[in-house]
Amino acid sequence: MTTHRVLTTVGCALTAVLATAWSAAPPAPARPAETTATIRTHDGLVRGATHDGYRTFEGIPYAAPPVGRLRWAPPHRAAAWSGVRDAIRPASACPQPAGEVPGGSTDEDCLHLNVTTPDGARPAHPRPVIVWLHGGGFTTGAGSSYDAHRMATRGGVVVVTVNYRLGALGFLAHGGLPGSGTFGLADQQAALRWVRSEIGAFGGDAHNVTLAGESAGGYSVCAQLASPAAAGLFDRAIIESGPCTGRADRPFAPSSVPSATARATGADLAAKAGCGSAHDVMSCLRRTPVASLLKAQGTDQQPAYETPLLPRDPAAAITSGRFRHVPVLLGGNHDEGNGWAAGIIQAGNPVTPATWPDVASAFFSGPGQAKAVVREYPVHGTDGGPVFGAVIGDADFACPTARTGSLLAAQVPVWRYEFADEHAPPLTPGTPPFPLGAPHASELPYLFDLGGRPRDLTAAQHRLADTMIDYWTGFARTADPNGPSSPPWSRRAVQSLAPDHIVPTGTARIRHHCAFWDALG
């Protein structure tokens, strides 16, 4: 295998891993419940747990198990139940390889969600709702990984975290198969319909729903903004590190692909699973064990556009103004690319002045592109890691995010941020080959307890976490993140978020580098 192919393969494989790296820690012990609380939904009674200042209802089905004939079918309504259904622990994660979910998962009965609601939230006094879509490269992740009690209690909001179908089970495309390439996105819409119908019983305001996500979850928000089928399902949007103008030729940020490309990927999966020459390919695939499908699928999964659910690439929809016009909070991290750069280097691919041209050409293969990148981002001595990280961060995240923000701001109110804590707690074990700063996903511990475990934050970082929660939940409440206790946030500038340094930031560096990337094509 050539150096180019090795580096590209390593880079794609790291995409999901780096966004879910907190899985290295053992699972947190179950939170002790003081009492239980029972809520009536249209499908039946659910019994959740009452904690200090908040309540949780976990593992609630929002759609029928996608098994048998429902594997690769649009989500169907969940069956009602009699009696009281326990909702005191998470349900299974959707099928995925080992990683964020210890040992992975092969359980297709996974279309469940979790509700965290603060004390005082009641149908008579409903609170704003945030629906969270997890990241993980459309291949890994689970809603239950995000303990949202800090956001619920400090922000006074109801938080819903969602499982959706992943990998080939969520995004397979095949000729003549309704819903090809978008089953995972359809699941997200089914969860949003459940929220509109049911969240009032939990004390949530069904008429004030913010759809939020990070990485693949952030790009999912872009897709839902562009999907006609999602019209009326949410009222605001938060997009973290998932710019809507992602491109398939920039392999680190999430993106979508044309339906023809998705069908070719589906045909390749069918062949690897032993169904390529079957008389009825779909029947064969529906009989194939989940473990075999996971083994056959690629590490990189993408939704398909030119489909009924997603008629246009989200980038094209945003550019043309043909998207759901709702207020947006949008941003990314200062050092998005450093985690991937570190991982590729640790996999045995050093970045030195001598190797940098070959490394650059692995990701920028157009005529003259690699040479232009090397000139714009020269490597001197031992700074190869940070330089490589800056290239990934600028090309895949910072510049697409800036472009997304400009396109959206021409149509809707947009609030933009950059998470810039250079001492953010690491999400991966071990010592990286260079300081990572604020890499991809490093803002998440400031909003959630990942895996139910609080991060080891300094006093200043705790204050930043509180401020971020205030901003996010303030936006969910009124479409304006500003509040009486937070530093003012102007829509005219990007808000830089770092401990004791929350200020509008200049954009000269980004403008300079983005002009380069625009010219590179």
Image (spheres, rainbow, N blue to C red):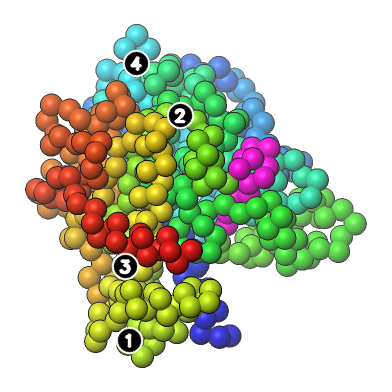
Point out which mark residue 352 bears.
1
Secondary structure at numbered mark 4: loop
Considering only order in the chain, which callout, 2 or 4, is on the residue closer to the N terminus?
A: 4
Q: Is residue 311 magenta?
A: yes
Considering only order in the chain, which callout, 1 or 3, is on the residue closer to the N terminus?
A: 1
Q: CA distance from mark 4 to mark 2?
A: 24 Å
Q: CA distance from mark 1 to mark 2?
A: 46 Å
From the viewer's perspective, is the residue at label 4 or at label 3 nearer? 3
Instruction: Residue at 26%, 50% (x, y): give it.
Output: 418
Secondary structure at numbered mark 2: loop
**Callout 2 touching callout 3 (CB < 8 Å):** no
Considering only order in the chain, which callout, 3 or 4, is on the residue closer to the N terminus?
A: 4
Secondary structure at numbered mark 3: helix
Q: CA distance from mark 4 to mark 3?
A: 44 Å
Residue farthest toward the top in the current orientation of the protein: 124
**In this rendering, would 424 be left or right of 460?**
right
Residue segment shown in magenta: 301-312
What amino acid type is highlighted by mark number 1? Answer: Thr
Point out which mark residue 390 bears.
3
Q: Give the residue at mark 4.
A: 126
User: Residue 292 versus residue 475: which sits nearer the camera?
Assistant: 475
